[in-house]
Amino acid sequence: MWSVEFESSKVEIEVTKLIRTGKITSEDRLVITTWIRLITEEGPARIQKEKRWDDHPLTADWKGYRSSSFSNSGRIIYKIENQVIKILIARITPDHDYKRLK
């Protein structure tokens, strides 16, 4: 089984703020929960092969990370650590903003 964790407390605070301000809706949260369930039970290959998630590797500043869609513009940016054990959520963005957090 895989585990899903925030990459840092800063990311967790950002996600909490997005939820509190309504930028991540209750519908988005249901989709994100489905993504987490699928990836923890079956691993990243399950998400990567399903067209619905539009999962793909990123480049430039995000090299080594992947992006999965949870809505038309919302993305979960994550990386696979040790390729076996954990998936770390690096960023959940409701508006397709790929700027790296400082």
Image: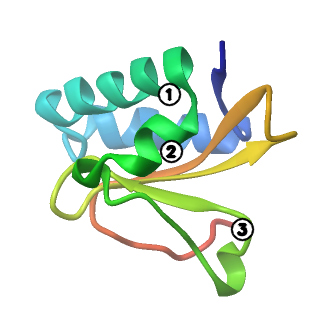
Q: Percent from the top left, x then y, of residue 6?
A: 65, 34
Instruction: Tell me how far mark 3 sits from mark 1, CA to CA.
Output: 27 Å
Q: Is residue 15 above or below residue 93?
A: above
Q: Percent from the top left, x then y, of residue 42?
A: 51, 22
Instruction: Tell me how far mark 2 sits from mark 1, CA to CA.
Output: 22 Å
- Disc 2 and disc 3 in contact, CB within 8 angstroms: no
Residue type of the residue flagged with mark 3 = Lys
Q: Residue furthest right?
A: 82
Instruction: Tell me how far mark 2 sits from mark 3, CA to CA.
Output: 12 Å
Q: Compare marks 2 and 1 and give the one earlier in the sequence.
A: 2
Q: Say which quarter of the image contains residue 27.
A: top left
Residue type of the residue flagged with mark 1 = Ile
Q: Compare marks 2 and 3 and give the one earlier in the sequence.
A: 2
Q: Percent from the top left, x then y, of residue 32?
A: 33, 32
Looking at the image, how many numbered discs can be counted on the residues? 3
Q: Percent from the top left, x then y, of residue 23?
A: 22, 48
Residue type of the residue flagged with mark 2 = Glu
According to the picture, the residue beneath numbered tag 1 turns out to be: 39
Q: Which residue sits at x=40%, y=49%? A: 49
Quadrant showing the C terminus:
bottom right
Instruction: Say which element carries label 2.
Output: helix
- Disc 3 and disc 1 in contact, CB within 8 angstroms: no
Instruction: Say which element carries label 3.
Output: loop
Judged by depth in the image, the label closer to the viewer, 2 or 1, is 1
Q: Compare marks 3 and 1 and give the one earlier in the sequence.
A: 1
According to the picture, the residue beneath numbered tag 2 turns out to be: 14
According to the picture, the residue beneath numbered tag 3 turns out to be: 102
Compared across the picture, whether 68 is left or right of 24 comes to right
Q: Which residue sits at x=64%, y=66%? A: 101
Compared across the picture, whether 82 is left or right of 35 comes to right
Q: Say which quarter of the image contains residue 47.
A: top left
Colouring chosen for the image of the structure: rainbow
